[in-house]
Image: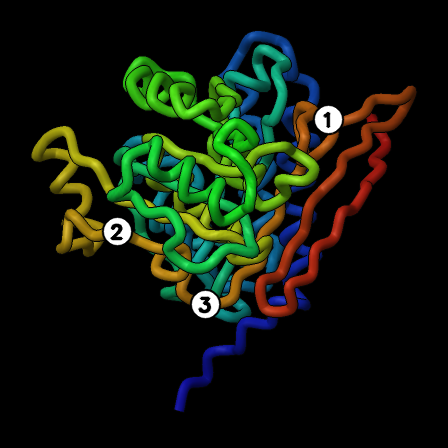
């Protein structure tokens, strides 16, 4: 019989919110300063420091990169006091380092936690992603459909015309044909420069954000983080890993992935109940920016538990030294 402590998501959730908050506060002074590396490093340091205060035996499964590339919060790093449940942690201490450096919308600090073995160990390669919000039958859109077919299928399910659909796509040269095809249906596109975890999360709150669907190629680790968010918010996400060379295929094998063509649904990427926290750094349609008043910094954090479906928005006011 295992003596491993149980994963009490409710007890750990406020601690996780604090981790996201502190990472955001650490990057606050670097918003708009043009230094991506410094902003990222400040968030990494703060997130790691806070994680090590939690009573968990944590392993970073989605982090800052391979051990030889990242000195902290690397994939496989153990965090926490060690006195607690074994947990998988997926994190991006600053999702949108460029957005922070340029003071552009939707930079977030993001972290998810679940029981050990609950999250896909996605290698640092690209992933073809497709996401929609809650309330639709499973598989209403698929990665095998053309972009135009996805738009018309979602419009039919929503009971509207393609021109009433808005799709979020990362603005990259590789997406030019996709953008052209989506626009030809009459649908509108919200292009984002960075931050595709936030891009996917926008689908789950379409009434607030105006985004119905996310599609395109982005980082696979961000795909797992987005799946953790949708596990809490509701919605569908599908991902297929993309490999450009043998080195990237080798990374997949190292992560234990044998079927390189597999399409992962949300619950394949995140197999158990998780908790998820995100704190706004720069303002956006999901979360407001860090607010400065004389002597104070104020953050807003989204804290969610998939087990209960609970969603908290918390404001934290911290004195500046």
| Nearest-to-viewer mark from 2 and 3 | 2
Q: Mark 3 packing: few (<14 Cα in 10 Å), some, or many (20+)?
A: some
| Nearest-to-viewer mark from 2 and 1 | 2
Q: Which of marks 1 and 3 is nearer the N terminus?
A: 3
Coloration mode: rainbow
Secondary structure state at the residue bearing disc 3: loop
Q: Is residue 50 left or right of residue 248?
A: right
- Residue, x 65% and y 68% (percent of image)? 308
Secondary structure state at the residue bearing disc 1: loop
- Residue, x 51% and y 22% (percent of image)? 188
Q: Position of residue 24 (x, y in %)?
A: 65, 32
Q: Does the image show residue 77?
A: no
Quadrant including the N terminus: bottom left
Q: Mark 2 points at which residue?
A: 263
Q: Could you say which is closer to the camera, residue 267 or residue 111?
A: 267
Q: Name the residue under label 1.
A: 289
Q: Position of residue 12 (x, y in %)?
A: 64, 63
Q: Where is residue 39 in the image (x, y as percent from the top left)?
A: 56, 21
- Residue, x 59% and y 69% (percent of image)? 307
State whether residue 107 is above or below residue 198.
above
Q: Mark 1 packing: few (<14 Cα in 10 Å), some, or many (20+)?
A: many
Count up the numbered dots. 3
Q: How far apart are marks 1 and 3 (CA)?
A: 31 Å
Q: Earlier in the sequence, mark 2 or mark 3?
A: 2
- Residue, x 54% and y 68% (percent of image)? 83
Q: Name the residue under label 3.
A: 272
The answer to which quarter of the image holds residue 108 is: top right
Q: Which of marks 2 and 1 is nearer the N terminus?
A: 2
Q: How far apart are marks 2 and 3 (CA)?
A: 18 Å
Tags 2 and 3 in contact by the CB under 8 Å rule? no
Q: Where is residue 90 in the image (x, y as percent from the top left)?
A: 45, 49
């Amino acid at each position: 019989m295992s003596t491993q402590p149980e994963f009490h998501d409710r007890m750990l959730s406020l601690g996780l919110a604090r981790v996201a908050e502190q990472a955001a506060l650490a990057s606050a002074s670097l918003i708009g300063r043009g230094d991506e590396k410094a902003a990222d490093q400040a968030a990494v340091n703060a997130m790691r420091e806070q994680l090590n205060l939690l009573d968990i035996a944590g392993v970073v499964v989605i982090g800052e990169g391979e051990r030889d590339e990242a000195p902290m919060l690397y994939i496989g790093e153990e965090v926490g006091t060690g006195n607690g449940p074994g947990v998988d942690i997926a994190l991006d201490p600053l999702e949108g380092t460029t957005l922070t450096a340029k003071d552009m919308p939707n930079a977030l600090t993001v972290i998810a936690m679940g029981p050990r073995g609950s999250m896909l160990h996605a290698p640092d390669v690209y992933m073809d992603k497709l996401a929609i919000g809650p309330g639709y039958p499973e598989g209403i859109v698929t990665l095998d459909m053309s972009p135009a077919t996805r738009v018309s299928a979602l419009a039919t399910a929503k009971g509207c015309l393609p021109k009433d659909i808005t799709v979020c796509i990362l603005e990259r040269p590789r997406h030019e044909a996709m953008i052209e095809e989506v626009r030809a249906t009459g649908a509108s596109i919200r292009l984002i420069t960075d931050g595709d975890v936030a891009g996917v999360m926008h689908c789950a709150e379409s009434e607030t954000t105006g985004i119905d669907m996310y599609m395109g190629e982005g980082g696979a680790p961000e795909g797992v983080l987005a799946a953790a968010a949708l596990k809490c918010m509701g919605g569908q996400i599908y991902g297929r890993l993309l490999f450009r060379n043998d080195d990237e295929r080798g990374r997949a094998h190292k992560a234990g992935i044998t079927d390189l063509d597999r399409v992962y649904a949300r619950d394949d990427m995140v197999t158990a109940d998780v908790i998820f926290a995100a704190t706004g750094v720069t303002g956006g349609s999901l979360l407001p920016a860090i607010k400065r008043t004389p002597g104070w910094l104020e953050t807003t954090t989204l804290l969610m538990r998939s087990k209960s479906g609970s969603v908290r928005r918390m404001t934290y006011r911290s004195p500046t030294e």
